[in-house]
Image: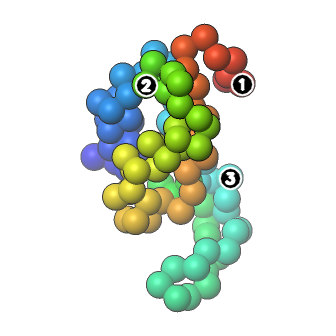
């Protein structure tokens, strides 16, 4: 299973979102420098290392923006430790304005 599929599955089970998009943005970061095991390397843009997570979920109602981000980061801690370098999170409760 791909990292993206794993992320989508975890988010679906944890938050039962009304709308969800998980976008692999790794290719947008080609040429950026990453610290990997103490070595500086130029990222080639391949793989599954940078994601944008967009969620509209009743689970976020009444939570602050920080608490929403914390909930997603906690859920995906294993993926973040295993090589996902960046996670852009756009959480919203139903009825809140989104940019997507």
Give the label, 1 or 2, closer to the camera: 2
Picture residue at 61% right of the left edge, 74% below the top: 34
Give the label, 2 or 3, closer to the camera: 2
- As helix, strand or loop, the secondary structure at mark 2 comes to helix
Task: List the residue tagged with mark 1.
Answer: 99
Where residue 32 sits in the image (x, y, percent)?
70, 68
The reply to whether the C-beta atoms of the residues labelled 2 and 3 are less than 8 Å apart is no
Where residue 97 sits in the image (x, y, percent)?
69, 18
Where residue 20 sits in the image (x, y, percent)?
49, 25
- How many callouts does the rendering have? 3
Q: Which label's residue is closer to the chain start, 1 or 2?
A: 2
- As helix, strand or loop, the secondary structure at mark 3 comes to helix
- As helix, strand or loop, the secondary structure at mark 1 comes to loop
Task: List the residue tagged with mark 3.
Answer: 28
**Gap in Å between the C-alphas at discs 1 and 2?**
19 Å
Q: Quadrant of residue 12?
A: top left
45, above or below 22, in the image: below
Picture residue at 61% right of the left edge, 67% below the top: 44
- The answer to whether residue 6 is left or right of residue 45 is left
**Gap in Å between the C-alphas at discs 2 and 3?**
30 Å
Picture residue at 51% right of the left edge, 22% below the top: 61
* Along the line of sight, the residue nearer the viewer: 44 or 57: 57
Task: List the residue tagged with mark 2.
Answer: 59
* Residue 48 seen by the camera: yes
């Amino acid at each position: 299973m791909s990292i993206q599929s794993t992320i989508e599955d975890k988010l679906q089970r944890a938050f039962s979102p009304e709308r969800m998009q998980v976008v692999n943005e790794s290719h947008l970061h080609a040429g950026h420098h990453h610290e990997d095991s103490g070595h500086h390397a130029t990222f080639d843009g391949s793989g599954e290392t940078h994601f944008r997570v967009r969620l509209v979920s009743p689970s976020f109602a009444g939570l602050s923006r920080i608490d929403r981000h914390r909930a997603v980061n906690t859920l995906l801690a294993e993926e973040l430790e295993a090589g996902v370098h960046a996670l852009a999170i756009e959480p919203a409760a139903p009825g809140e304005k989104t940019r997507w």
